[in-house]
Image (spheres, rainbow, N blue to C red):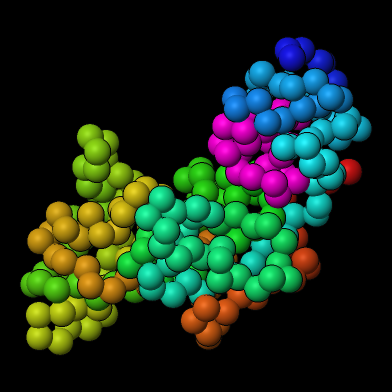
């Protein structure tokens, strides 16, 4: 099914499915490619098809409702959980540990298996994508314990970025908080969220990270949120902090 509607109120079907909280945009594109999405009883063949929500939209035969208002939660991710809805190795995931009362949510970025701390969750795929982009300008802040010897002058070199996968990262600010023996606590700030960026940046200085805690993401902080706990950001605070970044709802 291919069409090019011109209505500016319409959006791509993959984006609509993500906004509705059914799946991430990439997952929605895979569902479409697998022939599992239909609009008005016609199976789609392209994720570029446009809809406005008045259509009969179904995924695996189940009706997709109108996208709800965007919501955001803070979650204190413990060690040992994968930030994924499914894991091929059958390891426990973040989403399996959330309260049953929560709607389907996706994460804003990721924290790997051995990382802990603040993870933002949202019911809106478009919002998640917006908050992940470096151009949003939000700083991610971490407390890192690393084994090895390092000076502040060496850490200051990270302000020029480091080469990761053949591309230089953005500036990374790192400051020594304390040193005990061969372990140092270091505060790290950056505005990107590339795969294992903090660990790999410190490894370039011959440091081995043995604990990594994200303590803030943009204006949202971990604070005293208990490990494994989840707390919804109040709508008023959400509007104040996100402003024009919030997806429009009808």
Give the residue drawn at x 16%, y 66%.
208
> Residue 246, image x and y in percent?
72, 50
Q: Is residue 226 above or below residue 161?
A: below
Q: Residue at x 28, y 74 (%)?
A: 211
Q: How many marks?
A: 0
Res 41 visible = yes
Give the main secondary structure of the magenta stretch: helix
Image: 126 above or below 183: above
* Horizontal and vertical percent position of residue 47: 65, 25
**Does residue 12 belong to the magenta stretch?**
yes
Q: Relative to the observer, which residue lies in front, 64 or 250? A: 64
Q: Look at the image and say whether residue 85 sits in the magenta stretch.
A: no
Q: Tell me what residue is drawn at x 88 percent, y 30 percent.
A: 55
Q: Please state if 55 lies on the left or on the right of 95 as rendered.
A: right
Quarter of the image with the C terminus is top right
Observer able to see residue 240: no
Q: Position of residue 109 (x, y in %)?
A: 49, 53
**In the rendered image, which quarter is residue 241 located in?**
bottom right
């Amino acid at each position: 099914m291919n069409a090019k509607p011109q209505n500016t109120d319409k959006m791509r079907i993959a984006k609509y499915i993500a906004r509705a909280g059914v799946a991430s945009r990439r997952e929605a594109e895979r569902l479409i490619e697998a022939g599992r999405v239909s609009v008005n009883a016609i199976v789609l063949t392209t994720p570029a098809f446009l809809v406005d929500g008045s259509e009969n939209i179904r995924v695996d035969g189940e009706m997709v409702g109108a996208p709800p208002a965007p919501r955001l939660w803070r979650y204190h991710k413990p060690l040992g959980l994968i930030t994924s809805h499914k894991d091929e190795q059958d390891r426990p995931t973040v989403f399996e540990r959330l309260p049953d009362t929560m709607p389907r949510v996706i994460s804003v970025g990721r924290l790997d298996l051995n990382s802990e701390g603040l993870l933002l969750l949202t019911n809106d795929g478009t919002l998640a994508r917006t908050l992940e982009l470096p151009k949003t300008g939000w700083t991610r802040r971490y407390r890192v314990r690393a084994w090895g010897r390092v000076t502040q002058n060496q850490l200051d070199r990270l302000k020029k970025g480091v080469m990761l996968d053949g591309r230089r990262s953005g500036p990374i600010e790192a400051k020594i908080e304390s040193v005990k023996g061969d372990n140092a606590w270091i505060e790290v700030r950056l505005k990107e969220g590339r795969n294992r960026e903090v660990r790999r940046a410190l490894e370039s200085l011959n440091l081995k990270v043995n604990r990594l805690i994200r303590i803030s993401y943009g204006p949202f902080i971990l604070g005293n949120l208990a490990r494994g706990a989840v707390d919804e950001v109040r709508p008023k605070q959400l509007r104040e902090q996100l402003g024009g970044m919030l997806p429009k709802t009808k």
